Image (tube, rainbow, N blue to C red):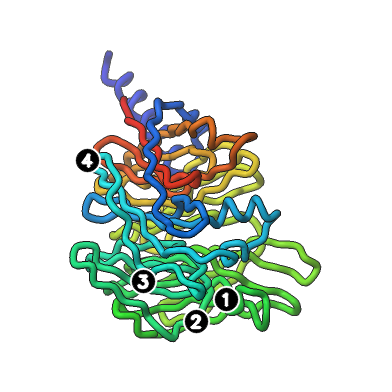
């Protein structure tokens, strides 16, 4: 090969890389089905309800996850969001040892009683070693796994939903509703707390006439302190839309959007690189930002019916691990100008797959070239080797 040919090939390679980084790649990789192992924990709730694994986070080689009957009761009750309150139940945080591949005893953060009827929703493995958790209808708190020290933080109110760690270790907590049982003003807010639970500020989101804004997930840019939130938007006619909220470091709302694209989930890594999964007219797109500006864009292919990008976790090697309800997991890594993208499809157990069962993959993490994911089908963890 002469110098001219080498130059042409080099320019073609550079052009192809540029097209990928600009989001112009023709075809995203197809999901590769992988041999999937299912781990199951024995029931730990001493009440009548069967708990399932859902929101998760990892720290110190352990996967922590909320244990809740929410989805089973939702389906059984034709969408009754208050089903969890019918029976008393323990508040439990599940644990799975990623290195050993086995469950640990769950953290029991509150015992069931006539007044304890909710369950653990989101968990956050904080850099200070504590595991923070929400229960939506009842308490917010934290526990230290090693010492067992436990604290319920009083006076924050109800409706607390999803968690994120921000600059200086502050806690960012979405309040889905100020009245989750449906009485009173229901629009939600964003709380910023110190690690000990003191309120630094709360941003309330006011809707239009007859409109309720219910924030779900929050992503915090560690460099600027700005936040992006996903939200359900309930209209007076009974319809439900999807919104995006952009809030600055002081809590001021910079922008509200109800138009396309729909933001499914967002996450920032420790260096301030943001990952935004969006639905653009039925096509999934991953938009990557850095320094407050778009860095690159990656097409993820068509969105499947009843599928959702539920979580993004950042692995130790900076891989963004995107979990979808369907069991699809996208692994995206951007180092310098080199972008890699792999897609695997985790197989759900037969008893958890439609039509006989309903289950959702919620969170997925990467550990030693192996993917682990929580599955809402009892206390279940799916695992698969990445292979080549």
Nearest the eye: 103 or 268: 103
Q: Label 3, on which residue?
A: 224
Instruction: Give residue 322's position: percent from left, percent from top.
Output: 43, 46
Q: Label 1, on which residue?
A: 188
Residue at x 39%, y 61% (from the top left corner)? 92
User: As displayed, is residue 299 above or below residue 218?
Assistant: above
Q: Is residue 322 visible?
A: no
**Mark whose residue sits in front, 3 or 4:** 4
User: As displayed, is residue 30 above or below residue 332?
Assistant: above
**Mark whose residue sits in front, 2 or 1:** 2
Instruction: Determine the secondary structure under disc 4.
Output: loop
Which is nearer the N-term, disc 2 or disc 1? 2
Residue at x 64%, y 34% (from the top left corner)? 355
Q: Label 2, on which residue?
A: 157
Instruction: Determine the secondary structure under disc 1.
Output: loop
Task: Evaluate if marks 1 and 4 touch, with contact meaning CB atoms under 8 Å apart.
Answer: no
Q: Residues within 10 Å of mark 2 (few under 14, many from 20)?
A: some
Q: Label 4, on which residue?
A: 100
CA separation in Å, label 1 and label 4:
40 Å
């Amino acid at each position: 090969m002469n110098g001219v040919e080498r130059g042409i090939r080099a320019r073609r390679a550079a052009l192809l890389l540029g097209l990928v980084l600009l989001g112009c790649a023709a075809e995203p990789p197809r999901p590769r089905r992988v041999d999937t192992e299912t781990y199951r924990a024995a029931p730990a709730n001493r009440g009548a309800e069967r708990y399932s694994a859902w929101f998760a986070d990892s720290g110190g080689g352990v996967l922590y996850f909320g244990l809740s009957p929410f989805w089973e009761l939702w389906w059984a009750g034709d969408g009754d969001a208050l089903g969890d309150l019918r029976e008393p139940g323990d508040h439990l945080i599940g644990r799975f040892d990623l290195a050993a591949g086995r469950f640990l005893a769950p953290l029991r953060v509150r015992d069931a009683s006539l007044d304890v009827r909710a369950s653990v929703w989101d968990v956050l493995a904080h850099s200070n070693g504590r595991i923070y958790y929400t229960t939506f209808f009842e308490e917010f708190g934290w526990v230290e796994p090693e010492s067992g020290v436990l604290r319920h933080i009083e006076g924050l109110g109800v409706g607390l939903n999803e968690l994120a760690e921000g600059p200086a270790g502050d806690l960012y907590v979405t309040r889905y509703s100020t009245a989750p049982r449906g009485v009173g003003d229901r629009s939600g807010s964003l709380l910023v707390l110190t690690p000990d639970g003191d309120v630094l500020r709360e941003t309330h989101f006011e809707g239009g006439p007859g409109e309720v804004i219910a924030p779900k997930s929050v992503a915090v840019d560690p460099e600027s302190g700005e936040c992006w939130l996903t939200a359900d938007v309930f209209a007076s006619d009974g319809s439900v839309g999807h919104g995006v909220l952009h809030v600055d470091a002081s809590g001021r709302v910079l922008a509200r959007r109800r138009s396309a694209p729909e933001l499914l989930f967002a996450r920032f890594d420790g260096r301030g690189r943001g990952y935004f999964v969006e639905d653009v007219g039925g096509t999934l797109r991953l938009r990557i930002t850095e320094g407050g500006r778009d860095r690159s864009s990656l097409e993820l292919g068509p969105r499947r019916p009843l599928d959702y990008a539920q979580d993004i976790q950042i692995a130790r090697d900076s891989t963004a691990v995107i979990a979808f309800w369907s069991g699809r997991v996208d692994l995206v890594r951007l180092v310098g100008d080199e972008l890699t993208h792999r897609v695997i499809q985790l197989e759900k157990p037969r008893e958890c797959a439609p039509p006989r069962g309903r289950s959702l993959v919620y969170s997925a993490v990467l550990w030693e070239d192996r993917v682990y994911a929580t599955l809402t089908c009892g206390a279940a963890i799916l695992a698969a080797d990445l292979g080549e």
